[in-house]
Image (tube, rainbow, N blue to C red):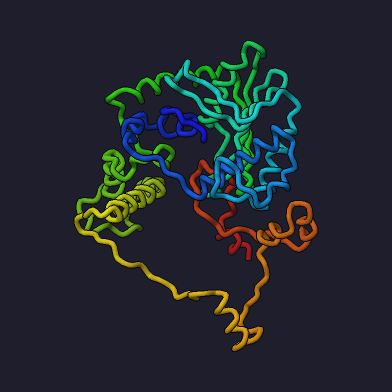
Amino acid sequence: MTAHAKLSASGSARWLNCTGSVKAEQGFKDSSSPTAEYGTCAHELADIVLSTGKDIESFLGETLNDAPNVKVDQEMIDNVQGYVSFVQSFKGEQFYEVRLDYSHLVPGGFGTSDAVVIVDNVLHVIDLKMGKGVVVDADNNSQGMLYALGAIEEYSYLYDFDKVAIHIYQPRVHNFSTWEIDINDLELFGAFVSKRAKEALSDNAPRTPGDKQCQWCKAKATCPALAKHTEQVISADFDDLDGLPLVDTLPDEKLSMILSNKKLIESWLKAVEDHISHALLEGGEFPGYKLVAGRSLRKWANEDEAQTQLIELLDDNAFEKKLLTVAKAEKALGAKRKKEIENLIIKPEGKPTLAPESDKRPSINNCSDDFEII
């Protein structure tokens, strides 16, 4: 399994934005999840195919060393093959799953980049992301920039780099982004990183709540800074929380501030709930709360026996059929045949969704304008 640095590149969005999180996370155990294991398997598959040239289809249904609980499925094969093709499209010196050391800036700092490609004087850092929950942007991506700083330290004796291109390949949400930075600006980032790392390793590093840094922080549930921030957002200008004012009586600036913190507050509340549940599951007590049995649905004790008897009783009515969704149909057909159904697919316009001004999607027309035209 891959080792992790205390000030890791993958966790840099946390410790660069909240230096106090490093000390706060001490004592918390590392945990995994089916999603993380799936990603680990996909990365290992990509490394094997890129390094050996083996036929990726031959791994269908197989398990790999780093994720023994995950079987390679067709979706993984299709997505990883897309990533492999993307990496191979660069005609230059290529390195896969390469450990990069940036300890000249961050004490003990290192990380493993999925792919590093050098084309002429451009350093390409390519990161495969298999997650579906959070879209990762290449723009000012601190993980990619730390990998680039490590790669420059590793290969600068062979190459004169002019600029760096960071690529995020996130196929399960159709996110493929690229961002470039010149070497001088990257060195300025390196100086900033060095200063933040020194603070993060000190005993009095401050905690600074925010979306990026709190998202994956293990100490989120018990963080006093985040609790205080949430209280300030919710209670700002409210003398009595039992009698909150009507939304339409608040100024726009206040509503905007509250909504801007929605994701962070919801994330904190979920972390608090998980923390209390875990304490109770471990046999402890928590004032005001207890564990109870959740809602349960009836199910067949033995599906094979139930199927046999229901066929006798109901014939074909023992089963129900429905058309596959587009995604399931494409998965069933595979990458080579899914083009055969492209003419059957449409993508309706999405429902209007509220987003911050920083969102890269274009603003849609005001609906009221359409009614005025009618």
- Residue 77: image x %, image y %? 68, 47
As drawn, is 199 to the left or to the right of 363? left
Nearer-the-camera pick, 280 or 242 = 280
Q: Residue at x 74, y 39 (%)?
A: 54
Nearer-the-camera pick, 67 or 317 = 67
As drawn, is 36 to the left or to the right of 222? right
Q: Quadrant of residue 16?
A: top left
- Residue 302: image x %, image y %? 52, 74
Q: From this viewpoint, is residue 252 visible?
A: no
**Numbered disc total:** 0
Q: Give the residue furthest to the right.
A: 340
- Residue 338: image x %, image y %? 76, 56
Q: Residue at x 68, y 40 (%)?
A: 83
- Residue 269: image x %, image y %? 33, 51
Q: Residue at x 61, y 82 (%)?
A: 318
As drawn, is 282 to the left or to the right of 339? left
Residue 348 position (above or below residue 83): below
Q: Give the residue furthest to the bottom.
A: 313
Q: Which image quarter is the C terminus in?
A: bottom right
Nearer-the-camera pick, 275 or 71 = 71
As drawn, is 264 to the left or to the right of 115? left
Q: Residue at x 66, y 26 (%)?
A: 95
Q: Quadrant of residue 290?
A: bottom left
Q: From this viewpoint, is residue 127 visible?
A: yes
Residue 78 position (above or below residue 150): below
